[in-house]
């Protein structure tokens, strides 16, 4: 599908399958944001991120279901990537992918802004810094 013929994946596909500056993501928590746009990826030289990477996002759209949102439109906050729409291979040979690119918004001290998560979180999210994010999720895939 996206291979070069010799069994390796196309580098352009690998670049597009990760989160980079300008990518839109859906928010899983109940902070009030629905859609955010990535501004910067932290911790990577090539400025692309995958599951568990911390990013800087700008809120683009609010959820209509939440009457008192904790964030505002065009507010800049940190987030952690919790799921990718592109397929990702694990070490045991299993390939997993979500239905869309998702994230959870974080406060300045690294805790989630919302108190609940609205969808599954990829279990490749590192547990040490994001234990609260994994605890809020109803299930993991």
Image (cartoon, grey):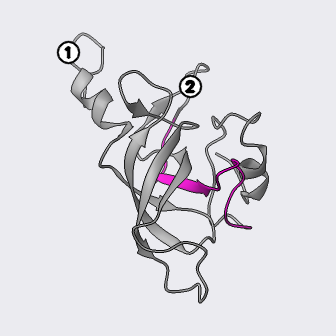
The label on residue 29 is none
- Res 87 visible: yes
**Closer to the camera, 60 or 27?**
60
> Which residue position holds label 1?
5
Q: Which residue is mark 2?
A: 90
State the SS at label 2.
Answer: loop
Which element is circle 1 on? loop
Q: Is residue 10 above or below residue 27?
A: above
Q: Earlier in the sequence, mark 1 or mark 2?
A: 1
Q: Is residue 13 magenta?
A: no
x and y percentages locating residue 99 in the rendered image: 45, 55
Q: Which residue lies at the image location 58% right of the left edge and 57% below the top edge? A: 105
Where residue 88 appears, as percent x and y from the top left, is: 47, 32
Q: Is residue 100 visible?
A: no
State which region is magenta: 96-115
Q: CA distance from mark 1 to mark 2?
A: 21 Å
Locate residue 11 relative to residue 59 in the image: left or right: left
Label 1 close to label 2 by CB (< 8 Å): no
Q: Is residue 67 above or below residue 3?
A: below
**What residue lies at 68% left-to-right and 66% top-to-bottom?**
114
**What secondary structure prevails in the magenta region?**
loop
On-image quarter of the N terminus: top left
């Amino acid at each position: 599908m996206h291979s070069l013929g010799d069994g390796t994946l196309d580098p352009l596909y690998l670049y597009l399958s990760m989160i980079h500056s300008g990518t839109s993501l859906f928010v899983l928590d109940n902070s009030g944001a629905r859609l955010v746009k990535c501004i910067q990826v932290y911790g990577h030289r090539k400025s692309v991120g995958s599951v568990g990477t911390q990013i800087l996002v700008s809120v683009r759209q609010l959820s209509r279901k939440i009457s008192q949102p904790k964030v505002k439109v065009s507010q800049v906050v940190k987030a952690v990537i919790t799921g990718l729409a592109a397929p990702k291979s694990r070490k045991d040979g299993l390939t997993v992918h979500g239905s869309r690119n998702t994230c959870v918004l974080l406060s300045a001290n690294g805790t989630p802004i919302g108190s609940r998560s609205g969808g599954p979180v990829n279990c490749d999210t590192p547990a040490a810094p994001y234990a609260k994010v994994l605890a809020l999720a109803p299930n993991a895939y």
